Image (spheres, grey):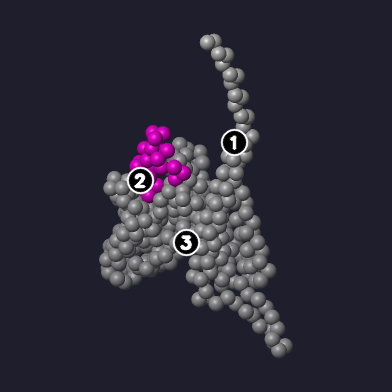
Amino acid sequence: MRRELGMSLVLVLMCAGLYISNPDFLGQSNVVNTARQISMLGIFAMGMGFVIISGGIDLSIGSVIGLTGVLIAKISSTGMGCLGYPLWVGIPAALSAAVLVGLAQGLLITRLKLQPFVVTLGGMLLVRGVSQTVAEGGTLSFGDSPFLDLANGGLLRVGGDALIPYPLVIFLAVLAAGAYVLHFTVLGRYMYALGGNREAAEYSGIDVGKVEVLTYVISSATGGIAGVCYASYIGQMSQLVGMGYELYAIAGAVLGGCSLRGGEGSALGILIGSAIMRVIDNGINMFQVRYVDGGVRRIWRLDPNWTFIIIGTVILVAVVFDQVVHIVQAQRRARRADDARAAAPRPIDAPPTADTG
C-alpha cells in the first residue's frame, strides 16, 4: 500500500503541475478524453497485471487488441470487403478469437514448458499477421455505424458532451472484477503464490498449470475488450492498431507496483500506473511554459518527438526503482535475521557428568 500511496502522490503532483502550466488540462473535453484513454489502457493493463503477478509476461496483448477490432470490422461493417453481419455476431466472435489466443499460448507455456517471453513474442507476430491477412493489408472502416457511439458516447451529457464515457464504465467493471479476483478469491491467492515461488506453489498442491493458463486467458480477454473499445474509438481498423500497446500495459502495471519477478501488485496500483502513463502522454501535448522574449509573449512546448524518449525513460526508471526496492528489502530481511540470531539465548552447557569409576 505504501507504493500505491507514493504513486498516487506522484500522479496528483503531475496533474497539479500540468494545470499550473496549462489550465486547459482540467477543461471538460481534455478531462473526458484523458479519462477515456486511461480507461482503455487500464482494461488491458489489468489483464497484463494478472500475468505479471503470476510471474509471466504477455507480449501479444497489443496484437490481440488489433485482431479484435479487425475481426469486428470484417464481420459487422458494411464497407467494401466486409460481411455486414450484425454487431451481436461480430463482437462475440472477435472476443472468442481473443480468448482462444490466450488459451493457446497458455497451453503451449504449461504443457510444453516453453518460456512465456518466446511464446507470446511469437504470438504477437502471428496474430499481427492474421490481422494483416484479414484486412488484406488495408484499412477496414466502420463508416457511420452506431458501434462508434460505444467509445465516443457516454452518460451525464452536458452541452452535448458526455461526462462519463462508456469506456470508463467498462473499465470500472473490469477493475472491480479484477480487484475481487486478485484480493478476495482463492484463484487470486494462487496467482500471488505462483509468482512468489513457483516450486513452493507446486509442493503446496496448487494446480500451477491451470492457474497459469487462466492468467493468459484473462489477459487476452481484457485485450479483446479493449480492442472493442479502440475499434469504436478509432472508427477504422488495420493491422497497425495496437502496435506497441503491450509496452504501455507493462509500464502501467510496473508503475503501479507489479514486480516483474511476480508475486506483487494490486488492482488499485494498476489503475494508478495506467493513469500516470496516460497523463504523461497527454501532458506532453498540454505542458507549456510562458515567457517574454524582447517584449513579446511566447509559449514553449515539449517536442512531440520526445514522446517515446519520455515514456521509455519512465519505464526504465520504474524497473530500476523496482530493483532497488527489492535490494533494500532483501538487506532489511538479512539484517533482521542477523539481529534475531544475535538476540536469541545461547544454550546453557550441561554440567560435567560425575566419574563413577
Tell me the kind of residue under disc 1: Arg
Residue that lies at the very extreme toward the top in this rendered image = 356
Residue named by callout 2: 213
Q: Which stretch appears magenta?
A: 195-218
- x, y percent for residue 304: 52, 75
Residue that lies at the very extreme toward the right in this rendered image = 295
Q: Which mark is residue 350?
A: none
Q: For this rendering, which residue is in front, 101 or 51?
A: 51
Quick check: 71 above or below 138?
A: above
Residue at 55% from the left image edge and 55% from the top image edge? 324
The reply to whether the magenta stretch includes residue 216 is yes
Tell me the kind of residue under disc 3: Tyr
Classed neighbour count for the residue bearing mark 1: other residues with Cα under 10 Å, few (<14), some (14–19), many (≥20): few
Residue 213 quadrant? top left
Q: Is residue 298 left or right of residue 138?
A: right
The reply to whether the magenta stretch includes residue 162 is no
Q: Is residue 28 left or right of residue 139?
A: right
Q: Residue 248 carries which label?
A: 3
Residue that lies at the very extreme toward the front in this rendered image = 357
Magenta segment's dominant SS is helix
Quick check: 200 above or below 219?
A: above
**Can residue 262 be seen?**
yes
User: How many numbered dots are placed on residues in this image?
Assistant: 3
What SS does tag 3 mark? helix
Tell me the kind of residue under disc 2: Val
Q: Residue 341 carries which label?
A: 1
What SS does tag 1 mark? helix
* Cα–Cα span, label 3 and label 2: 23 Å
**Can residue 224 be seen?**
no
Q: In this view, does 179 lie to the left or right of 216?
A: right
Residue 86 quadrant? bottom left
